[in-house]
Image: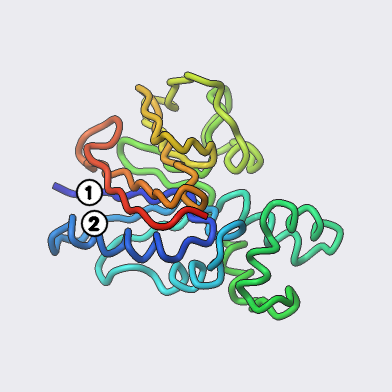
Amino acid sequence: MSLTYVIPDLHGRFDLLSDMLAKIEAHAAGKAGTIVMLGDYVNKGPDSRRVVGRMRAGVFGGWNFFPLKGNHDAMMVEALSDPSRMGGWIEKGGDATIKSYGGDPSTIPQADIAWLDRLPLMHLDAHRIYVHAGLDAGVPLQAQAEHTLLWKRYPKGDAAGFGGRHVVHGHNSNAAGPELFEGRTNLDTLAWRTGRLVTGVFDDDKPGGPVDFIVVRGPPA
């Protein structure tokens, strides 16, 4: 069985990321798999710099690794290239990111900014589409707007997938989640605040939602 592990919004919670990677490695029992990250590595939580550093270093040798871009990652890149956006970024948790880099946004390494900027917006496999926020069902896959992929909010109870594929996303935080629907799975459990991070485990040979979950818990914000 080939498995894909999907880690949602981290928002600077390096502690939860470290614990989750250890649990994934144990769950895989020595067999290499795939890890998909749903974006939002930065802002709000205390250790954005360390999260970005860990993501840039990769995960496990021999594993497939697909880190995607989230709207908060995009906000950081935009603010650091356009001073007029700095205030909006700080209001959305960028102050915590700046603090994690030592308190001066001008010292944030260009390599980290460039890495965030280059992240892809989605990942596809045989049965699923992985994306930070969501997809517009009325638009062809390759014509999806970046704003939709990074910012979409599904209407409450919307169970739709996309073109026969199950959609796996974060972004729409629900502390009681994850949220499971016929056509999509929302994994965002507001981990940066609740201290509860949930990874979805998907069987690469079977369509549909997760076959298992891995949960780690840390102190709430």
Q: Is residue 212 above or below residue 63?
A: above
Determine whether the residue tagged by mark 2 lies in a helix, strand or loop.
loop
Q: Which amino acid does the dot numbered 1 rest on? A: Leu
Q: Whole-percent x and y of residue 150?
A: 60, 43
Classify mark 1: helix, strand or loop: strand
User: Which color scheme does this rendered protein use?
Assistant: rainbow
Cα distance between the residues tagged 2 and 1:
5 Å
Task: Please state if 134 lies on the left or on the right of 127 as rendered.
Answer: right
Q: Residue at x 29, y 30 (%)?
A: 208
Q: Position of residue 205 (x, y in %)?
A: 20, 39
* Residue 48, picture quadrant: bottom right
Judged left or right of residue 195, residue 148 is right
Instruction: Name the image quarter holding residue 73.
Output: bottom right
**Labelled disc at residue 33:** 2
Most foreground residue, 58 or 9: 9
User: What residue do we see at 47% from left, 47% from top?
Assistant: 194
**CB within 8 Å, label 2 to label 1:** yes
Percent of width and height locating residue 85: 81, 56
- Which residue is labeled 1 in the image? 3
